[in-house]
Image: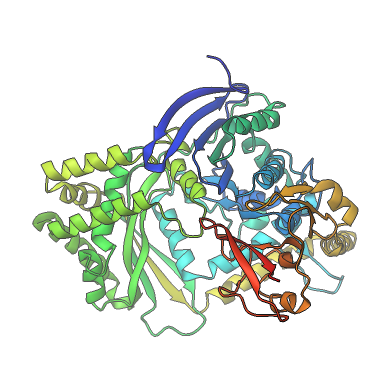
Amino acid sequence: MALIHGFELLQEREIHELNSHARLLRHAATGAELLSLENDDENKVFGIVFRTPPSDSSGVAHIMEHSVLCGSRKYPLKEPFVELVKGSLKTFVNAFTFPDKTCYPLASQNLQDFYNLMDVYVDAVFHPLIARQTLQQEGWHYELNGPGEPLTFKGVVFNEMKGVYSSPENLLAHSIQLSLFPNNAYGVDSGGDPRHIPDLTYESFQRFHQTYYHPSNARIFFYGDDDPDERLRRMQASLAEFSALRVDSQVGLQPRFTQARRAIVPYDSSEESDGKKNYVTVNWMLADTQDAQRSLAFQILAYVLIGTPASPLRKALIDSGLGDDLAGMGFENELRQMVFSTGLKGVAAEDVERVEKLILDTLQGLASDGVEDEMVAAALNTIEFRLRENNTGSFPRGIALMLRSLTTWLHEGDPLAPLAFEGTLQAIKDELQRNTGYLQSLIEEYLLANAHRTTLVLQPDPQLRQREEQAEKTRLEKVRQSLSQDELGQLVEETRRLKLRQETPEPPQARAKAVPFQKTEWPHGPKVTWTVDTATFLPVKSGGFGPCKSKKFRHSLKASARCSTGISCFPRAGMVKPTCSARWCWRIPSTPRRLGGRWPSVSVISRSTRWYRWRLAG
């Protein structure tokens, strides 16, 4: 088969549900897979994803996500990501750590800006600097400010995860996952447990990147109206230096339980409990995510059970008065095997058993008596409407589609199956027509007769924080006692050097050489070329309309024409964008006001993206 810029075509089809032409390709030299969705959406999306199953709760996947954006071979700045945000026209830049994958997505409506961002991200993931100080800053380090000062743990992820573990809702979701998946990668915390983050060594940190951050373990995603061939050409240039590598990153299936299990997990409660602060959930591991029809059927079933105030299971729980509100994960299909979880929060200790019994009894009644036809029809219509509307709000649509495709793609399945939903939806409609008890059979098979079930109780513990703080102090004291005076002095010096590095600003000359925002053409309107000053990151115009001369007008817009990156774009650019998914500009007056004795005029350049050109009339 002929190669297209180093890629072989695996699958090509129209996805009418998304008005997109899809191509699934594989890089011949490395095996990297690339999904290309071509459509007329100007909010272009690029994402690169690595399957990163952790083996422990040291948070190495999470720390690596932070660290690769702290300087790379081509962009050797301390934080090119920060500089990137300052000068970009992006609508989205971020990175996500999941229990089994790490994603680096971006979006922009400007083509050159899109390519610039992509270049920074690709170099960051494949060629990060990740020095020892990077792990110390983003992960954890011992901090000692002087020989007589206390020894403490510090680090961005360490501090972040302490906050996560202090939230009962976050702890509940994490504990549900661990209770259902004790024997595979989901049985540890990819984000990092603060008790285990200091176990991560620099050698393990480096080895994690060498193992998983390779094109052979990558899934690359494109979406939007950019040139599809240019996508492949640019990726081939980035992947050309690599060869195939065998990467063992598969997430194994969790073996099924032979009987239901129970777990009690304490959570920090800052005040004495009145006895009604328990969280109680009943949780099930369902089936493999690869079956698109079953996945969509479970989504409909979950909506029937708990999706609305009138849903029978939700109504039974709320009306029981046993708790304050619903708790649990609901339906989750982003893991290797799907999960359903529900329960109550604000439960008295003596009512814990009653909540579990109520859930099982309600499900038994639904399996025996059936679900109201109107409820099923409403759930089916709602899910179908959501799929067809594909409304992601301010979140870029392409990134939402990337995440949806990964539910199957990450585990060697067809990435287009979750996107082309028409056939799957029709199959479920046909099944409901043939078998009115279809959803009842799912309740019976996957909930009532499913032994892979856990009942989780999250209990308030006013003394938990004190015990954890004491355990951390004891650990640090043991470390201190094991160090000689010379080693303590070395820690003081390392602390000083790390703080100096963090506080020292990047020289403008280094930014000018390293950050790729040199020529950016603003979208829509007259042809105006902007050169971004790499020292100040302010746009300088060449051609087109001149900047506003009215000081009063500029002053009145000093808050509203200031974008989220800190650039006062209006006086220089003559163009502003009042609303967008990235809050690129703040509040722009909907009605121009008379300022400086003259009325500013507004002309619409593109209604679909709400870009406007402002200039003073007269």
- In the image, 422: left or right of 512? left
**Total number of numbered discs in the rendering:** 0
Residue 550 in the image: above or below residue 76: below
In the depicted view, which residue is nearer to us: 374 or 335? 374
Residue 26 in the image: above or below residue 340: above
- In the image, 224: left or right of 155? left
Name the spot of residue 320 as percent of width and height, x first: 22, 76
Determine the image quadrant of residue 248. top right
- In the image, 23: left or right of 523? left
Q: Is residue 613 visible?
A: yes
In the depicted view, which residue is nearer to us: 367 or 111? 111
In the depicted view, which residue is nearer to us: 384 or 32? 384
Residue at the spot 87% in from the left edge and 51% down from the top edge: 510
Image color mode: rainbow
Name the spot of residue 493 as percent of width and height, x first: 89, 62
Say which quadrant the C terminus sits in: bottom right
Instruction: Name the residue furthest top.
Output: 1
Instruction: Name the residue furthest left.
Output: 369
Residue 478 in the image: above or below residue 191: below
Name the spot of residue 216 as percent of width and height, x first: 60, 30
Q: Is residue 259 visible?
A: no
Instruction: Name the residue furthest front.
Output: 618
Residue at the spot 37% in from the left edge and 52% down from the top edge: 389
Residue at the spot 75% in from the left edge and 68% down from the top edge: 548
In the depicted view, which residue is nearer to us: 319 or 547? 547
Name the spot of residue 295 as percent of width and height, x first: 32, 45
